[in-house]
Amino acid sequence: MSSEAVLTTSRLPSELIELAIYHLRLLSLSHKDLLPCTLVSHEWLVLARNHMAFVLGANHAPVFLECLHSPHLTLLTTARRLRIVSWCDGPSDPYHKVLPLLQQFTRLRALSLWCDPPDDLPVLPELTEFELFGTFPTFNGFTTFMSSLQPTLRRLVLYRVPSKDIPEPLQLAQFPLFDLTALGLEFNDKYPPLESLLLRFRTSSLTLDLPADMHRVGLLQTISRYLAFLAGDLKALHLKCESEADIRFVSSLDFYSNTNVTCIQIGCAVRFNVLPPSFDISLSPSFETLFSKIMAHSNSTSTPSKIETLILGVETESWRNAPPYPSFHHLSSLLTSSQFSGIRDLQFVVEGSPFCFKGLARLAREKFESLIPSVLPERVCQMVSCVDGEDPDEV
């Protein structure tokens, strides 16, 4: 790029640059796609950093600590998003030397901890987003940190139960109440759900990751009661299904009280066989059952459907003898039914295959997109959009 081009670009209004970077982040799978923006000018560098997540692994910690002594360091005053990743045990792990420095990130607004934080994790009252993929030593430590995030916290993601001990009822009662714009929850076999803790979170957007396990009826009952607790406040629901078994599992949830949901996202609802020459597209056998359960409250004309946005995950694989799935044409008949009458935006998130190279998500999406006009009516095609999902090993 010539110096003249750089000068011309740098004179763009900051609002326009911010808008361009924002839309680039929405369209990009990886934050690495924002790196070229940092090379345009100092203004672009500062604005791009607002949308970039800095990932700090255990191997990076010593170098990072050295960089803090540099007189030219600007990271502490510009970084707004930070992810710390380490699964080593013990206080000797390098990331334990980084955590006490978090308060020096004066503009930090989003923190993702893929590690087990200590109970004395520094309070960060300016955080608006927090993701915890780990556990505090005690529930009191988790409570202390979460209490410091009021009232600024807006987005929260919790993987597992966030402490190694089981809290007493009095401890749960002292946990702060949060009114969030988005909440993500993942439950696995090792950690039981804490229903009393869930009731401390109100949210208008809920993401659930519930691995299929038909022996965990209690988990479905707990989540169903939480959905009833959210009731009409819930506007967006994302079910992170990763298989047909997951879709069958979540179909047992009770959504009857969630009468104001306008956006639904369901993972693995569509199967796309990229093996030539068939390029077969089919629909999850359990999709209709699940969607009927979600729409149970609108089976009468007195309570019409409010769904405006439907996002379906597309599982991309190569099958030679795949088990039969309903034809994708079945989705056409569903979309023309009264239950779908309010939908204005139909989006497909096309995932990359774990058995193929990085970049397949884009290639699969382009192929899938080209087939849409042949399998959906023209009226439906007008509201369809396709986006890239995740590629293997993508951070």
Image: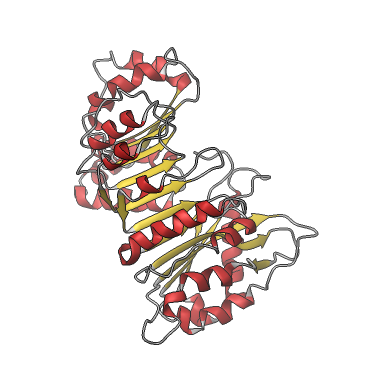
Measuring 49% from the left and 42% from the top, which residue is drawn there? 192
Q: Is residue 241 above or below residue 67?
A: below
Number of marks in the image? 0
Percent x, y of residue 263: 40, 66
Q: Looking at the image, which is closer to me, 150 or 365?
A: 150
Q: In which image quadrant can residue 262 be found? A: bottom left
Q: Is residue 2 visible?
A: no
Q: In the picture, which quadrant includes the N terminus?
A: top left
State the image coordinates of residue 185 (x, y, percent, origin top left): 43, 47
Q: Position of residue 20 (x, y in %)?
A: 31, 52
Q: Residue furthest right?
A: 321
- Report which quarter residue 91 is drawn in: top left
Is residue 172 found left or right of 335 in the rendered image? Answer: left
In-image side of 249 versus 179 (left or right): right
Image x and y of residue 233, in percent: 30, 63
Q: Residue drawn 52% across and 79% down?
A: 335
Q: Is residue 53 above or below residue 366?
A: above
Residue 245 vs residue 282, the one in the foreground: 245
In the current view of this chain or complex, which residue is farthest to the front? Answer: 169
The chosen color scheme is secondary structure
- Residue 53 shows in this picture: yes
Q: Nearer the viewer, residue 218 or 182?
A: 218
> Is 186 rendered above or below residue 257?
above
Residue 27 is left or right of residue 286, and the answer is: left
Compared to residue 159, the image places residue 140 above or below, namely: above
